[in-house]
Structures are given as C-alpha cells and as structure tokens.
Amino acid sequence: MAEVCTVGAGFSGAVIARQLAEAGLAVAVCDTRDHVAGNCHTERDTASGVMLHRYGPHIFHTDNERVWSFLQDYTQFMPYTNRVKTTTQGHVYSLPVNLLTINQFFGTTLSPAEAREFIEARADLSIEDPQTFEEQALRFVGPELYEAFFKGYTQKQWGCEPAELPASILKRLPLRFNYDDNYFFHKYQGMPRDGYTALVEKLLDHPGIEVRLGTAVTRADVANYQHVFWSGPLDGYFDFRLGRLGYRTLDFREIRASGDYQGCAVMNYGDPEVPYTRISEHKHFSPWEEHANTVCFAEYSRACEPGDIPYYPIRLAGEQALLRDYVALARDESNISFVGRLGTYRYLDMDVTIAEALDAAERFLALRAAGAPVPAFFTEPA
C-alpha cells in the first residue's frame, strides 16, 4: 500500500517520487493521461522515425549544478544549441535580437559599441520604471524592433495587447550586442538522447514506485495517503469552485514533407496577420540523427477552455486575485502539498521545476522525520 501519492507523472511528480522511494517510502504516481512526462512527452513517429515533442518543443538548459548532476543518472544529454529564427516584415532574422539582427534590420554594419549607442538613441528613456511589456520593450529596444519582433508575436501568444502584460515577461528575453545567437545563456544545454519520456520512465523505474496511468485523483482520495503531492491544476483540486485560473493553450497543425522543410528547428512569425506563432521542425531537435522525411507543427495560441491542456499561466490582475483565494483554501487542507507549474500557477522552466521538486522531497523527508507539519506550498505561488 502506497504511503505517498504524487498526482502527475511529469517532472515534479517523478522527481519527488524517486527521491521518496530512494528514502524507503512506497509511492503511487497517478496521471490521467496514458503516458508519463506530462507536456514534455516525446515519442518516435512511426512513419518518419523522428522524435516528436508532442506538446511543443522543450530544450533543456540550466546553470544549476545540482539539477544537471542529478539528471546524468537517468539520461545522456546530447549537445544542442537553440538557434531560433523569425520571419517578420518579409525577411528572416536571428533571435534573440543580437548584433546580426540589428545590422540586418537597419541595414548597418555597426560594431558592438556603436550598436549599443544606436539602440539607446531609439529607446524611450522617459520610461524610467517599465511596468508593462510594451513599456519594457520601448525602453530597451525602441519602437522599430518592438513592432517587428515582439508586438505581433506577443498579441498572438497571449491574446491581449502588450500594454496589458507585465514587464517581467519580456525580461526573459535577452538583447545582445554581439553575434551570439544561442537563445539561452546557461552553462548546460542539451537534449536527452532518447527523449524526455524515456528520462522520466527511468526516474519512475524503482521497486518503491507504482505508476498508475489513466487514473484521476480527487480531493476525497487524499485521505487514503499519509501525504499527497499535487502537481495538477491548483483550481482543479477544488473543482474550480471559485472560478478558473486563466491559461493559454496551444493547437497544433501537423506538416509532413520530405527533406528539410524550413532549415531550422524553430521559426517564429512576428507579423500579426500570420495566425500561428511559430513552426517547429522536430528532426532538428535531434541533430545527431538522420531522417529522410520531416514532421513539423505550426502552433496556434488561444484561451484555454475546460477540457483543454493548460500551457501558460496568464497571471494578470484578475488571476492574481483568484490565485490568492485558492492559495488560502490550499493552506487549510491537510496532508497535501501543491507543487510544479500547475500546482503553483507559475511559468517554470524544466530545470526550476526539477530543482523545486528536489527541494520539496528533501524538506518533506526532514519534516516527516521531525514529526513536523508539511506546508501546502514549498515555494510561495502568489
């Protein structure tokens, strides 16, 4: 009989389950889907042989030594550099915005120092403390680059005007005054050789772990365990009694072709009249493999409805207020902790998700040994 249950077989649930099983606990891992790894799920396409990221591309990147070292026991990471391109205003450019992008866009041959001065001259320096996405963009890159690379894409991705979004969203995107087109800047970057699902399956391969796919866990089921780690939607645990937290979801249009369809893994589309945000060509995520044919997916972002898969938490003012109400309800519950992207209603990269899961398991074991209460949240969500 399992002592602990993790709800969700993504990284949060799998990492916590593994750590607790290693400590001698019997753990049930339940997921409503028919596969593990959550939205990181990968599978081999039978027709082309391409490894597909079924819920959109995931590239692993981190500076966290603990996380990187932890994962080495469960997969072999292959070298991979995420070099994104974007089509906007009839031309193709390199992202993130770097010195090549600037020189191509403005038809210049600027040096790093010249480019920095050039962009600062276009920036709206009257915006001293940017509060919105639009203010952040205008303050740091100016109107031309904002219109070409950020405005239309953001409108499609989030379904609202950039002036309604917090500045923190744009702060995730770098601006470089050199020719470095690596989308990420972390020390460790790569792709698991056999895909993310194989990685998670190895995490769950322990005699102390029982995986139950196609299995829903309800609030009433919590009493069957000494403790539950809930990585499903926070509002879903309470049957949405206060309303639904806002998410964006994605629809995918499959494209099959022979040879090389677009010449890169990810092509963004910044023009607002193009209905999709990007096209990902999945064989380029495994450059160590060779495939004669190719599979791509065009991504369409829209508001998440009941029954849809939630991808990106919106976290605007209304959602923040509703989140605080759900957090208050969660703190009144017993024997349950809310973890992960959905459980804490936060946008988390994979490495942060894994780091927080490792910390949660460590703290749980320490508190359990001390006979102390386990908190509803190990990381403050609001």
Image: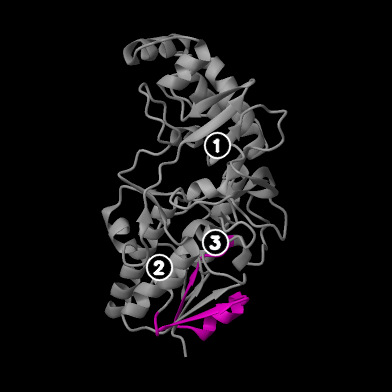
Q: Secondary structure at mark 3?
A: loop
Q: Nearer the viewer, mark 2 or mark 3?
A: 3
Of 129 and 301, the residue lying toward us: 301
Q: Secondary structure at mark 1?
A: loop
Which residue in the rendered view is the most extreme toward the front? 292
From this view, report whether residue 272 is shown above or below residue 235: above
In the displayed structure image, the side of residue 84 where residue 254 appears, left or right: right
Quote the CA–CA distance across marks 2 and 3.
15 Å
218 inside magenta stretch = yes
The numbered mark at residue 41 is 3
**Residue 376 in view here:** no
Which residue in the rendered view is the most extreme toward the bottom? 1
The picture places residue 9, in percent across and down from the top left corner, at 51, 69
- Using the rendered view, name the quadrant where residue 206 is placed: bottom left
Q: Nearer the viewer, mark 2 or mark 1?
A: 1
From this view, report whether residue 269 is shown above or below residue 316: above
**Residue 52 in view here:** yes
Q: Secondary structure at mark 2?
A: helix
What amino acid is labelled 2 in the image?
Val
Of 89 and 32, the residue lying toward us: 89
What amino acid is labelled 1 in the image?
Gly
Quote the CA–CA distance across marks 2 and 1.
35 Å
In the displayed structure image, the side of residue 293 where residue 355 appears, left or right: left
The numbered mark at residue 15 is 2
Q: Residue, x 57% and y 45% (percent of image)?
A: 315
Is the residue under label 1 in contact with that under label 2 (CB below 8 Å)? no
What amino acid is labelled 3 in the image?
His
The magenta-colored residue range is: 206-234
Pointer 1 residue: 263
Q: Earlier in the sequence, mark 2 or mark 3?
A: 2
| Mark 2 crowd level (few <14, some 14–19, many ≥20, 10 Å Cα) | many
